[in-house]
Image: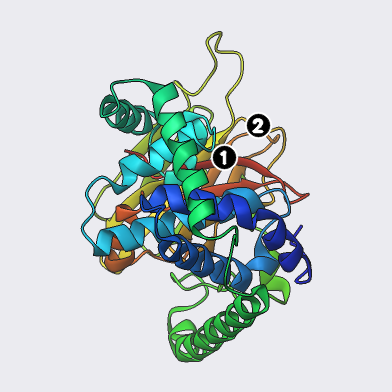
Amino acid sequence: MPHSPDDFATYAHARLPELLTTAHLLSGGPGDPREATELVRRTLVKVCARWRRIPRDDVDFYVRRSLVKEYLRRARRRRTRSARQRAVLVLLHWEGLGEAEIAQLLGCSTGAVRSRARRGLAVYGGDAERLRGLFTEAAESAKSTSGGVPFDVPLDAVEQRGRALRRRRRGVVVAGCALLLVPAVVFGAGGFMGAGSADDGSGGGASDVAQSPTRIVAPGERVDAVPGVQVWLTTDGKHWSTPERPNQFRALTGDSDRKGERLKPGVSAQLDPMKSGFFLSGLYRGLSADPARVEVTVDDRRITGTVLTLAGSPGWGVWYARTPLTPEELKSSSIDGGPTVTVYDAAGKVVARGGADE
């Protein structure tokens, strides 16, 4: 369930000290609080703009991910080569997150997180305690340098900027929908830009809590996902076919626990090239019930997926997006770890999260 707009100020007040400290450690310059302050300010403006659409149990993940992505964007402009490695070290040894959580946050594999953590820690002689001690010293130094003021931008100004950003996004979406009216009539509802296929992230209205359309299919029943692409399920996994890559298959084997008795919760994502962009689809598994919503996040864009499942609610199925990912969006998102897929249950709780397969 989304938050009330009035909750943002309360949440931001409570999290400001932690956010600013983490931002200082990410930026690597605790002697100058301006860098971290600007990083937190820009993060909270974006969070405020999307506040109505963030589920109540997913706020910390979304805010932390927004902070890290903003840091990585700024580092990329400055050609800082070790930015992702530093982010892993801060998240692991300061925030106390596990490798799996960091992988979800960065949109990469657990192995990639482990490798970056190992290389980064080697710089400090492989001593994790020493690194945590340095982080603590840097955090204390930042507080003393800033004169004990945790944040020097009023939250009312942040909220004002956030609302303005939300209005701009809504205006862009309305204009885009008007331009798409004629193509929608020509190509029909089965086209890439089919009704109900994309979120604008603007907040307000039914689109804020858009549910994923769900279709129950028989084994082997082929579904025309988008023009030229078919998806079908068998009891052993996902099948799909595109003009460029026909008859592909994703098995469920390998996703079970050691005894092979049940599937572990998770969701995958595959990207297939097409003339108009990239077709996004994936396989979710290990759920106690069919998902209420599958959402793909690409930078600041959100896409609601369509769900296919076999009769009998087996706890796994396929999702796909009826909106293409453009080459430009793929290139931009790949720098930050690629698209992130989040699966929600009927109560709005996150039940699985993953990224593009590596």
Q: In which quarter of the image is the N terminus?
A: bottom right
Quick one: label 1, few (<14), some, or many (20+) residues within 10 Å? many
How far apart are the two marked residues, 1 and 2, measured between alpha carbons? 8 Å
**Viewed as shown, does residue 301 lie left or right of 28?**
right
Q: Quadrant of the C terminus?
A: top left
Q: Is mark 1 on a helix, strand or loop?
A: strand
Q: Is mark 2 on a helix, strand or loop?
A: loop
Q: Which residue is drawn at 67% across and 38% down?
A: 311
* Quadrant in the rendering for residue 265: top right
Give percent across and percent down for residue 37.
Answer: 49, 64
Q: Can residue 277 be seen in this view?
A: yes
Give percent across and percent down for residue 151.
Answer: 58, 65
The extreme top residue here reads: 259
Q: Is residue 230 visible?
A: no
Name the residue type under label 1.
Gly
Q: Which residue is drawn at 73% across and 67% down?
A: 9
Name the residue type under label 2.
Pro
Give percent across and percent down for residue 202.
Answer: 60, 76
In this view, the residue in front, 74 or 272, is: 74
In this view, the residue in front, 174 or 98, is: 98
- As displayed, is residue 1 above or below residue 136? below
Mark 1, residue position: 317
- As displayed, is residue 186 above or below residue 356? below
Q: Which residue is drawn at 58% across and 85% down?
A: 164
- Looking at the rendered structure, which numbered label has been put on residue 308? none
Mark 2, residue position: 314
Q: Residue at x 40, y 34 (%)?
A: 250
CB contact under 8 Å: marks 1 and 2: yes
